[in-house]
Amino acid sequence: MGLRERKKQRTRDALIDAALDLFLTRGYEATTIDQIAAEVEVSPRTFFRYFASKEDVALSLTADEQRMLLAELVSRPESESPFTALCQAMRSLLKMLREADDAETGRYLRCQKVVHSTPALLAGTMRLIKENERRLVAEVARRLGADPCDLQPQFIVAVFVSVALACFDERTQDPAILARRLEDLLTLAERSLCPGWDLPVRSATAQPATAAG
Amino acid sequence: MGLRERKKQRTRDALIDAALDLFLTRGYEATTIDQIAAEVEVSPRTFFRYFASKEDVALSLTADEQRMLLAELVSRPESESPFTALCQAMRSLLKMLREADDAETGRYLRCQKVVHSTPALLAGTMRLIKENERRLVAEVARRLGADPCDLQPQFIVAVFVSVALACFDERTQDPAILARRLEDLLTLAERSLCPGWDLPVRSATAQPATAAG
DNA sequence: TGTCATCTGTCATCGACTGACATAAATTAC
DNA sequence: GTAATTTATGTCAGTCGATGACAGATGACA
């Protein structure tokens, strides 16, 4: 990797760190782009060459996590049922989080704190999750041999996302506690859902929605 | 109601209608506050005395719906299980929508179209739903005789919200089709969930939180 | 070393949003 | 009915987020 690439990466990381620090101390709204740029000693214009918006820099880590979640799901073996695969992908993500170095863990914790204390960032997080949900549905549908427009894959992913979202309480930021909460919720989900609910249905009567006939 | 109140209501409605029209024809981002204000013949400053932001005017109807959903839930009889009550509240909401006059139905349809074609508004909608979710959890917890921090009420509402969200596909805007889709999804949910999953659990090992005696 | 692609800073500009102040209108008191 | 009070609105000035255009600086590469 050339010098140019390394410098860019360093600038990008510095901008994220400076932004998260300022967001934490002064608050997201009260922090200006000028202040972030001044901290890293670049021009405000340069900030916008790295991040599309002020929200973007705050949610860049969240966006990475969503991409990783999808990648983990795709890499799960086909033998796992869709919901099991989703849960395992989530567990892998939390494992990576717990095994990360201090710098990354710190970034993650600051990011969580900022996001949970800023309604606009909470909305942005929801948007990212919702966008990723479409990709998750596509992958689950593929595994089921179903169409992404069918209700079943949408329902399976919807239940998973709702469980995952319920984990991200504002009080729950430490990855270890997060993992515990996830397991508790998955246990509850397991007790509530019928065995085989996320397996392909082959009956002729069901699935009237697609209107293919 | 005095003249002043009536004038305010008329201005507010006119701003919403003008905004939705412009958003639909020119797009949300391309529409400026000045254009909306000019359409209603008020100053741009006055716009911001009625709505906190450009997003606010686009989502004012959505915010109303969320308030109504909560009100419907509260008015459901205590004999209904939490999930049933949530579903019935949702059905009531859709019924009100189908029985509304043309002006309101038109506003609703335009609002749906605009929201679904604008990522920023989709995010805002998620935020509103997420905010309302906390109130729904509180009401469900009360019905269960549980604490709002317990996992069960959170899980029940999460499943409901995920089903409700799955209804609001971008292709599904007509209230009648929306109602059909909701029923299909609720049927699927009913098949997937164990009987009694949303009833209070009274076993000695679980749920230590309520401490009701 | 010189050429080229790319990164960066400066400047100008737009649009969302806010505070301060003055004016106009409706409500209330007399 | 008029005066006093409250409240809605318009005007103005200003901040901040975000973008396009252009010029200068810097790393890549022959």
Image: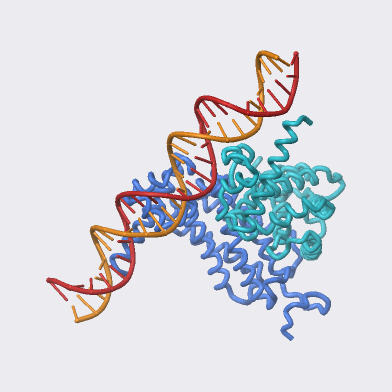
Chain colours: A cyan, B blue, C orange, D red
Decide: is A51 above or below A108: above
Q: Position of residue B204 (x, y in %)?
A: 82, 79
Which residue is at the front of the view, D21 or B49?
A: D21
Which residue is at the front of the view, A188 or C15?
A: C15
**For the point 66% across and 67% down, which residue is it?**
B83
Decide: is B35 above or below B136: above
Residue A194 in view: no
Residue B206 left/right relative to B15: right
Could you tell me which quadrant the N terminus of chain B lies in?
A: bottom left
Q: Position of residue A121 (x, y in %)?
A: 61, 54
**For the point 69% across and 45% down, which residue is it?**
A14
Residue at the bottom extreme of this rendering: B213
Q: Position of residue B108 (x, y in %)?
A: 47, 53
Q: Position of residue A166 (x, y in %)?
A: 70, 61
Residue B18 left/right relative to B79: left
Residue B139 in view: yes
**Number of marks in picture:** 0
Which residue is at the front of the view, A68 or A195?
A: A68
Residue D1 lies in what quarter of the image? bottom left
Could you tell me which quadrant the C terminus of chain B lies in?
A: bottom right
